[in-house]
Image (cartoon, rainbow, N blue to C red):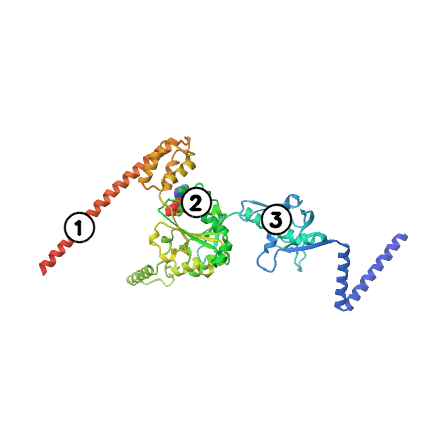
Amino acid sequence: MAVVDRWAGLGSALASFLFLWSMVQRHVPVTISHRVATWANKLVSYFNPYVEITISEYGAERFRRSDFFLAAEAYLSDACAPRARKLKAELGRDSSNLQVSVGDNDEVTDAFQGATVWWYVVKKVPRSNVISLYANQDDPRTYRVVFHRRHRDLVVGKYLPHVLKEGRAVTVRNRQRRLFTNNPSGGGRGRGDVWSHVPFEHPSTFDTLAMDPDDKEAVVDDLEAFREAKDYYTKVGKAWKRGYLLYGPPGTGKSTMIAAMANLLDYDVYDLELTAVNNNTDLRKLFIETTGKSIIVVEDIDCSVDLTGKRKDKKQADKKSEREADDKPKLPMEPEKDEGSKITLSGMLNFIDGLWSACGGERIIIFTTNHKDKLEPALIRRGRMDRHIEMSYCRFPAFKVLAKNYLDVEEHELFDQIGQLLEETDMSPADVAENLMSMSKKKKRDANACLESLVKALKQAKEEAAKAKVEAEAKKKVEAAAEAAKSKEEDEAKEGSG
Ligand SMILES: Nc1ncnc2c1ncn2[C@@H]1O[C@H](COP(=O)(O)OP(=O)(O)OP(=O)(O)O)[C@@H](O)[C@H]1O
Ligand SMILES: [Mg+2]
C-alpha cells in the first residue's frame, strides 16, 4: 500500500515538475533555454564516448542524390551486406542483376584498421498532418555512422574516403552497360526522355575481331591511352574526347568494332539516329544528356542526313518547283510535309567539338561510312575525327582469326590456297565468316568441309570479279567508240556548214 502511495506521490511530483518546467520554458528567454539544451548535450556527450556522422540522401543538390550517399550505399551492399540481418533485394535499374542492400532501420558493423564502426539506415519521415505508421518508399534516407571518439581522425581521414573510393568502384563494377538510342524529336515528355535504352549485350571483343594484327594493336593502344589520358587532355587544354572514323565496304566489321571498343573500355553506347533529330537544338540536347564513359555512334553518316549546304539548297529548290507544278489546292488541315532533318553541317560540327562537347568528358565519337570520299572534309578533319580507321576486305591474317574463332583451327593444308585466293579476291569478313559456319546444325561442324566451301566460294567470287571486269572494259570501249563517232559526226557537220 505504502509503495503504491509512494509511486503515486512521485507521479504527481513529476507531473507538477513537468508543468512547472513548461511554465518556466514559456517565460524564460529563448537564449537561456538554448543554453540549457546545449549544456544537456554536453553532459550527455561527456558520458557518451561515441561520435556520429550523418550522410543524407539529398545534399546540396536537391534534385540529385548525393554522390557520397550513393557510394556509401554501394559500399554497404558490397562489403557489409553479409553481416546485415535485414536485407533488401531489388532488381537493378536494368532488371537483369539483383542488388542487395541494407534494409531500413537496420544496424551493420564494419571494422577498419582496428576500429569498429556502426552503420544505421534511418528514414526521415516528413512532418505532415497525416499520421502514417510506415515510412514511405520515397522518403529520404540518412546513413548514420557511429564510432568511438578516439577513432575520430581515423574515420574522418581514412575510413570515409575509403568508403567513397570503394563505393565508386563497386558502382562501376556492378554497372550494367547500356545501349541507348534517341527518341524521335518532340516525342519526349521532358528532360531525360530523349534517349531510351536496353542492356548492352554485344559479345564482340578485339580477340574475335578479324583484322590485321598490327592495325588492331594500334587501335587498342590508342583506346587505352585515351582512357588514361585525363590529365594530359587537361594539360594541353582539350576536351577529353576522341573521334574515330570507321570506313570501308559493307560487312567488313565496322559495327562489330564499335561493340568491341565498348566492351574493351566498359563504356555505354549511344547510337544516334540522325534522321530522327529535327534540328540543331535537339542535337545539342541529345549531347548534353549523354553521360561520360560513353561512345556516341553515328552509323552511315553519309546516308543519314544531307550535311553539305550546297546539295541541300538544290533539294529545296527542287521541292519548290514541284510544289508550284502541282496546282492542286492543299487541304488547309494538311500540315506542311516535313522537309526531312534540318540538321546542318555547322550544327553537326558544333556537336562534335563545340563548347558543349566538353561537358562531362571521357567520350568517344564514332562515325561509320561506306564512302569516305563523299563526306564533307570539314567534318572529318583531324581534331574532329582524330583517327581514320579503314576496315578492308578479308586478307590472310584476318582470316586466321576467323578460322580460329569459328573452327578452332590454326593450321590446315588449305590455308596456303586460301591465303593466295584472299589476296586476289575481295571478300568481306562477313562473307568469309558465313562460309565458315555454313554447316547445318545437325552435322557436327567439320573444319575440312567449311574450308572447302570457302575455297569454292572464293573461286566463284574470283571468276565473277574477272567476268565483271571484262564486261566493264567492253562497255567502256563501246562508250568510247560511240563518243568518238559522235564527235566525228559533229566535226563533219561543222565542216559542212562552214
Ligand atoms: N572483321 C570482322 N571480324 C569478325 N567478324 C566480322 C568482321 N567483319 C564482319 N564480321 C561479321 O559480319 C557481320 C557483319 O559485320 P558488321 O555489321 O560489323 O559490318 P559493317 O562493316 O558494320 O557493315 P555495314 O557497312 O553494312 O554496316 C557481323 O555480324 C560479324 O559477325
Ligand atoms: Mg554496320
Front residue of 126/252: it is 252
State which tag comes first along the sequence, 2 or 1: 2
Disc on res. 62: none
Disc 2 to disc 1: CB gap under 8 Å? no
Q: Which residue is mark 2?
A: 217
Q: Nearer the viewer, residue 75 or 97?
A: 75
Q: Which residue is mark 3?
A: 75
**Alpha-carbon span between mark 1 and mark 3:** 79 Å
Figure quadrant of the C terminus: bottom left
The residue beneath circle 1 is 482
Q: Tell me if residue 286 comes above or below residue 450 in the rendering.
A: below
Q: Nearer the viewer, mark 2 or mark 1?
A: 2
Tell me: is circle 1 under 8 Å from ligand 1.
no
Q: Is residue 116 left or right of residue 494?
A: right
Q: Quadrant of residue 393?
A: top left
**To which quarter of the image does residue 321 belong?**
bottom left
Nearer to us in this view, 317 or 146: 146
Discs 2, 3 touching: Cβ within 8 Å: no
Amino acid type indicated by mark 3: Tyr
